[in-house]
Every structure is written in C-alpha cells, then in structure tokens.
Image (tube, grey):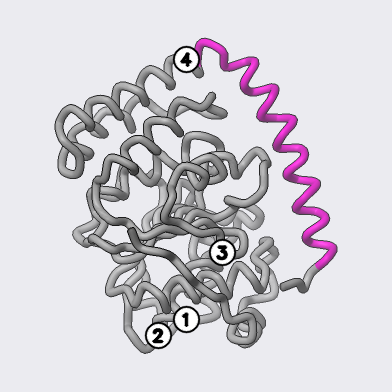
Amino acid sequence: MTSLIIEPNIAEAEVFLPMKPTWCKSDQTLTDAATLMAFAQYAKPKTMLEIGSSAGEGAAALLYATRELHSHLHGLDLSPTVYYDKSKPIGSVVFEAFPGFAERYTVKTGVRCDAVPTIDAKFDLVHIDANHSHPWGVYDFLWALPSLNQGALVAFHDANYLAAISQAAFYFARLIPNGAFVGNHFAFVYEGPTQTLFDAIMECLEINWQSSIPASSCAGLQVALSTVFSDAQAMQIASRVLAQNANYHKFSKLYEEVHKALWQRELQRRALLAEQKPTN
C-alpha cells in the first residue's frame, strides 16, 4: 500500500496565481493552486484528466506544473460556459492567460463523466472537481476507473469540510486507507481493483444521495466497470447505483430540502472565503 506524502509549495503558487485574468472570480486559493501543482509534480504524468473544468483555473495549475514534462490534459464539463460568467467558454483561463499551453489542453463540453471512455488515453493523474453532491464525485471516479494507469494519482477537490457540494469526496476520503488530505483535496494512489477499493465504493454508494443520475448515463456503467473488476463486482456496483438512484427519486423532495439547506451554508462559506482573499 502506497503511503502518500505531498507537500504543496506555496511560493510557487504565488508566482502562478497573479497570471490569471482579472475576470476570474472563483474561489481557488493559493493552497488550491499549490496543491494541484504538487500533485502534478508527484505524479509526473504523461496524460491527465480533469472532470469539472469551469474557468480552467485547475487546468492552468496542472499545465503550468507540467510545462517541462509537456503533459497533456483532457478536461470535461457539462456546461459550455463558466458558471459565474456566461460570456467565457470553459477553460478560458488556459486559453487567455497561458496560450502556449493550449496545444496540451483538450476540453470537451456538454458531456458528463460517462464521456471518459471516448478519450483515447490512459491517465496518470485524475482531478475530480465537478458536481460534488453525493454521489457524483464517486460516480465520476467510477467512469474514470477503466482509463487509469496503475499507480495513477486520483484527487478530489472540496473533500475536507462537510457541506452540500463536498459530501461525495468527504465520505469517500474516509473509506480509502492509503490516501491523504492535502489542502482542500483528498488524494490517493490507484493500486488496482483491490477488495478495499471495491468495498469503499459500495459503502459510499449506500450513503443517502443528494442528487440523481440520468438513466442514460447509467446504461453502460456495468460494461465499463467489467474491464476493471470481476463481472460479479461490476454488476454489484452497477446494481447499487440503479437501486440508489431509484431510492433518491422516491424521496427526492425530502432530499432536495436537506440539500438546499446545506447549499445555503456552502454559499456562506464561499462568501467568507472571498472576503479573506488572498489566503494560504
């Protein structure tokens, strides 16, 4: 079992962060940027994947850290534009502030995690930062699994506080024994389809969901997972996804009220964070 020790370099992030365009108003902190750079330097990836790219701040940090390795990053996002500035396409930070990195950055929009198999690549580093409402973080990971190289570094953003958008990573982090909290991320080294990983996935999926998954996205999950786990295990995971999805729809009104309350708390946290910038 690989013991993960990663130390972010805040000084390096202090050089990178001011390069971002002034319109960029997300809540990426010095610690966030430094952590992503440290992940890239640890993994020394040939190819990377980011699920949930938005403005492209995380993508820019990963590409900046791997500029000497010439690593390629594939990004996926459901929205065609940045959530807080609809005039900006997904990934705009990379294309505007770091145009020299554009040839190493491929971004697809209008797609979810189930589009990962359409990318002809295996990944050494995966950054999951899309819809954090449970179970999406774990579900994103499930679709990335068949495309992971042995020893790949998997990182979830927003994992170390209990708020509406972070619970998928929050729960999963507490079920994976070989990972570590680094800044506002949880990361672990993928060591193959172990029984420990299977058990963690099954247990995490059992926790009450905060959101549902489109039926069209669930359709090919079992087939995809059968390339990683045994047929029986792949069927068990897919069956739990379908059962919990149905259960969510049965109690959706109750879950939505709870989620709404937690989301309001998260918005308050973000407002406080914005008032405290810059921070490390």
Q: Earlier in the sequence, mark 4 or mark 1?
A: 1
Q: Secondary structure at mark 4?
A: helix
Left or right relative to 42: residue 46: left
**x and y, in percent, of residue 64 in the image:** 47, 81
Q: Which residue is tagged 1?
A: 64
* Amino acid type shown at disc 4: Asn
Q: Are marks 2 and 1 in contact (CB under 8 Å)?
A: yes
Left or right relative to 188: residue 158: right
**x and y, in percent, of residue 123 in the image:** 28, 62
* Magenta region, residue range: 249-276
Q: CA distance from mark 4 to mark 2?
A: 46 Å
Q: CA distance from mark 2 to mark 1?
A: 5 Å
Q: Earlier in the sequence, mark 3 or mark 4?
A: 3
**x and y, in percent, of residue 78 in the image:** 45, 46
Q: Which residue is tagged 2?
A: 67
Q: Residues within 10 Å of mark 4 (few under 14, many from 20)?
A: some
Please state which of the two labelled residues, at mark 3 or mark 4, is closer to the viewer: 3
Q: Quadrant of the N terminus?
A: bottom left
Q: Secondary structure at mark 3?
A: strand
Above/below status of 277 relative to 103 = above
